[in-house]
Image: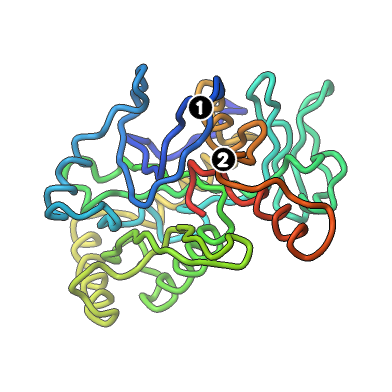
Amino acid sequence: MLKGLVITPPVVGRISIGRVVERNGKRLPEKDDQFTLTSQVHNREGWVPHPLDEKLRKEAEGHKLRSIPVRMLFNDPTLNLRADYSLFDRSTGRPVCVGNGESCRRAGKEGIVSLTCVGPDACVFGNDECKAYARLNVVVGDGEEDALGSFVLRTTSFNTIRTLSARLQYFNAVSGGRLACMPLELKLRGKSTTMSFRQAIYYVDLVVRSGLTLEQAISEARQRDEQRRESGFDQAALDEAARRGFANGAFEELEEDVPAVVEEFFPEGEADPVAAPKASSDGLRGRLEAKVTQLPPQGAAA
């Protein structure tokens, strides 16, 4: 294993909620109200759709793709969803500092150093450009084609990160540590807040697969776990291998992937003058408008 290289779950595609478009000479993220599954190939039109995208849309019978059947790769919730505070260098596209609110790893002239992390709100080094960023790896369907090949959902949405973190912990608890065997479903939900001026914003939730109760899903997970054990499948060893792989380096994102990540989730001048009014510096409305400009970028779940 190459030291310094984070070994992440094999990725066969992406799950996105929006895209990057060119507007007034700038490439900006544009939000959507449905999921899109893409391959890892990018051309002039954008990311090339994955074959599973068309299959799931047919199953949706003409409705927007707002749910995706999934399973987790690991029993440990923190291996499936990795969330941290991230700061990227816009000029090079490389990660500069990654922390969790207690400690951080920061790149400098002397290499990678470990420091105390105070979070983006109180960090002078971050200069208001550091924010929560998470990656969720899931197996779409039941892994019929590739049981260990995953789709990655990236997000800077606090709503999504908080919801997915809770759901993963809860499903792992109620299933007796059989999270990887639970039949689950990613679901796109909408909500309105004062900060969004009562307009709908979207976030990703994780629920029991459609047509099943929680009790039925737990029963299926127990049966699947027994079948795996009988076949020799070692879930504990898989979790441990992933844990070692994530700990093998400082930063998860590959250098070749970072420019696209920065463009979609850490764009320069995130406030869209078309979508958000200019903030006034005085009064409650002014403060709310200022916060609206800091909402998650339109290419990600809100």
Looking at this view, is 231 or 171 the one in front? 171
Quarter of the figure with residue 259 = top right
- Classify mark 1: helix, strand or loop: strand
Res. 39 image quadrant: top left
Q: Secondary structure at mark 2?
A: loop
Q: List x then y, in percent, for residue 150.
A: 34, 42
The residue sitting at 60% across, 27% down in the picture is: 3
The mark tally for this picture is 2
Say which residue appears at 37% left-offset and 36% top-offset: 10
Residue type highlighted by circle 2: Val
39 lies left or right of 63: right
**Residue 135 image point, x, y percent:** 50, 46
Residue 226 placed where, x, y %?
Answer: 22, 68
Mark 2 or mark 1, which is nearer the start of the sequence?
A: 1
Q: Return the residue found at the far bottom.
A: 215
Q: How is the image coloured?
A: rainbow
Q: Please tell me how crowded label 1 is: few (under 14), some (14-19), or many (20+) other residues with Cα within 10 Å.
A: few
Q: Which residue is mark 2?
A: 274
- Is the residue marked by circle 2 packed among few (<14), some (14-19), or many (20+) residues within 10 Å? few
Q: Amino acid at mark 1?
A: Arg
Q: Are marks 1 and 2 in contact (CB under 8 Å)?
A: yes
Residue 295 drawn at (x, y percent): 62, 51
Which disc number belongs to residue 23?
1
Which image quadrant for residue 224? bottom left
In the rendered view, would you say 300 is above or below 201? above
Residue at 59% across, 42% down: 247
